[in-house]
Image: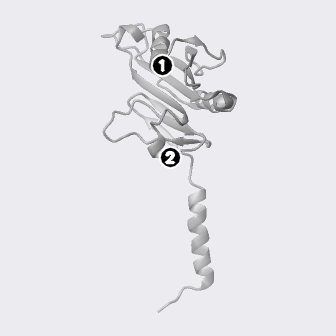
Amino acid sequence: MVRPTLAAVYLAAIIATSGRTMAGPKIYRNPEFEILLPVPGPGSLCPNPKNEHDHGFGILLGGGNAKDCHDDAHYRSIWLFAFFNALDDTKYLPGLLNMGCDVAGGPCQPGPADLQISGLLSAAATVKLPDGWIVIIVATQAGAPVPTWDPNVPSVNYTFYLRTRPEHRDQDLCAFRKILQTVKLSPA
């Protein structure tokens, strides 16, 4: 019987440990809406519930885990909701942005001017909630038009949300900008 030497055991432990730390970045993929996002380091990617259709991603900022993913009252987060552009109210970008503000819980106020998805027409707004939370929305559209819907408009709507508090706004905007700069969406 061959007994492993102490050196062999240490070598195996080092290899196992280094394999875990050298794992690649988490990648969110959604083939239906053609979304690809390398998840940035400071965020925690929320799992998509098995019984729900995957319309996009959620990323918690500043802590939390999978069970905290839908606790809007306590966690800063970034979300993307994608859906096919088949509604008259959201056919064009201004309507999509207004819907995003309604979903966030208030009227659209001006958003940071520099928030956009590279290469796509984008619009931004801010919603200030009575409980002190701030929601920043970025809306864009992409995807080849569907002739049976409307041959002149993109086929997919994308609405990005940053949910933050005033004391974390600047820090969270940096993470939001990084996501907006690195996410890959359906070609226009």
Tell whether label 1 touches label 2 (CB within 8 Å).
no
Q: Nearer the viewer, residue 158 or 120?
A: 158
Question: Looking at the image, which residue is at 52% across and 24% down?
Answer: 160
Residue 178 placement: quadrant: top right
Mark 1 surroundings: few (<14), some (14-19) or many (≥20) residues within 10 A = some
- Image coords of residue 187 (percent x, y): 48, 22
Q: Viewer-nearest of labels 2 and 1?
A: 1
Question: Looking at the image, which residue is at 52% across and 89% down?
Answer: 3
Tell me the CA gap for discs 2 and 1: 24 Å
Q: Nearer the viewer, residue 112 or 168?
A: 168
Give, as a three-letter code, the residue at label 2.
Asn
Q: Which mark is residue 105?
A: 1
- Image coords of residue 41 (percent x, y): 61, 43
User: Which residue occupies the extreme bottom position in the image?
Assistant: 1
Q: Nearer the viewer, residue 106 or 170?
A: 106
What residue is pinned by disc 2?
65
Question: Looking at the image, which residue is at 69% across and 28% down?
Answer: 170
On the rendered structure, is 90 left or right of 79? left
The answer to whether residue 49 is visible is: yes
Question: Looking at the image, which residue is at 40% across and 33% down?
Answer: 31
Q: Nearer the viewer, residue 23 or 58?
A: 58
Residue 182 placement: quadrant: top right
